[in-house]
Image (tube, rainbow, N blue to C red):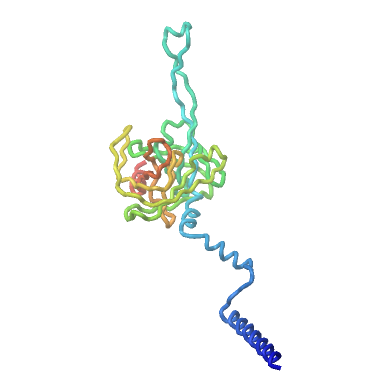
């Protein structure tokens, strides 16, 4: 009799515990079941942040600048009548690539002067794969800035911000298309870092003067030249221009011309 009573009491306790557990689950909103589609969607949305938003705002306006340049080389003619005149100058076409950013919906583009200097032909490719022949509107070799113009409809544009109040350590996003021609992909690459230093100046080299540069550890490669350096608000704060590296590869020391200087130069071109 005592055994059966104990069994009944045990069953009553189990039933009460189960009831209390169900009540708590309903009140607290606990869910012990596998994730639903709605929960998965919420998780996906959490992946979006200030950096992805900034990239999405600027990316459509970052262009690949494909340049054809004419170079003259001297070729030794060998032992012939022409040896009397020395080496024969030969003309050849050389292709190079850089980056740029559309800063005005009318089709105005800013890039580095060294990207388009000496160009016989300039082709601009947008991330949506549209291609345009570009006109060189003006160039400032000293400060390494050039203005291009393309004619098209529904052109995207990036918003120019200011570099006046930048803080060392704040996020910096570099966009450009360093190897797009190798992968047949016009979409820009993105690298993220911080503002490493401000107001970096360099002794004039090859006739160019770089003053008050922004230093960043966001990866910048040679083909990124002319592309934008962007803040967390999706505003262009500088134009990526060069890196300092003994090997020519990226080691996290990149420099950008502050956008305030760029804007002033563009107004004169």
Determine the residue located farthest toward the top in the rendered image: 81
Q: Nearer the viewer, residue 32 or 159?
A: 32
Query: Residue at point 38% right, 53% down?
Result: 161
Q: Is residue 172 left or right of residue 6?
A: left
x, y percent for residue 27: 57, 82
Query: Residue at point 45% right, 25% down?
Result: 71
Q: Quadrant of residue 220?
A: top left
x, y percent for residue 24: 58, 82
In the rendered image, the quadrant that contains the N terminus is bottom right
How many marks the image carries: the answer is: 0
Q: Quadrant of residue 30?
A: bottom right
Can residue 263 be seen by looking at this rendering? no
Q: In this view, does 186 lie above or below 35?
A: above
Q: Is residue 159 above or below residue 99?
A: below
Q: Which of 3 and 84 is in front in this view?
A: 3
Can residue 192 be seen by looking at this rendering? yes
Determine the residue located farthest toward the front in the rendered image: 2
Query: Residue at point 39% right, 41% down?
Result: 241
x, y percent for residue 93: 49, 26
x, y percent for residue 177: 49, 42
Q: In this view, does 11 lie to the left or right of 171?
A: right
Q: Is residue 160 above or below residue 9?
A: above
Q: Nearer the viewer, residue 20 or 110?
A: 20
Query: Residue at point 56% right, 40% down?
Result: 183
In the rendered image, the quadrant that contains the C terminus is top left
């Amino acid at each position: 009799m005592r055994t059966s009573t104990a069994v009944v009491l045990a069953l009553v306790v189990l039933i009460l515990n189960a009831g209390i557990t169900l009540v708590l689950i309903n009140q607290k909103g606990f869910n012990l079941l596998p994730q639903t589609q709605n929960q998965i969607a919420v998780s996906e949305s959490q992946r979006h942040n200030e950096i992805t938003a900034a990239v999405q705002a600027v990316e459509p306006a970052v262009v690949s600048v494909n340049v054809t340049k004419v170079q003259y080389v001297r070729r030794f003619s060998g032992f012939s009548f022409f040896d009397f005149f020395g080496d024969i100058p030969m003309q050849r076409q050389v292709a190079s690539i850089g980056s740029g950013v559309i800063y005005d919906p009318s089709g105005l583009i800013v890039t580095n002067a060294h990207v388009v200097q000496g160009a016989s032909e300039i082709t601009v490719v947008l991330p949506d794969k549209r291609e345009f022949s570009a006109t060189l509107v003006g160039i400032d070799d000293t400060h390494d800035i050039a203005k291009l113009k393309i004619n098209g409809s529904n052109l995207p544009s990036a918003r120019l911000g200011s570099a006046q109040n930048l803080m060392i350590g704040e996020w910096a996003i570099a966009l450009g298309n360093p190897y797009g021609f190798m992968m047949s992909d016009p979409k820009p690459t993105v690298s993220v870092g911080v503002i490493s230093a401000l107001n970096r100046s360099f002794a004039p080299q090859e006739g160019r003067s770089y003053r008050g540069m922004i230093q960043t550890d966001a990866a910048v490669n040679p083909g990124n030249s002319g592309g934008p350096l962007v803040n967390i608000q999706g505003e262009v704060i500088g134009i990526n221009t060069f890196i300092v590296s003994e090997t020519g590869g990226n080691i996290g020391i990149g420099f950008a011309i502050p956008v305030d200087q760029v804007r002033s130069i563009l107004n004169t071109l």
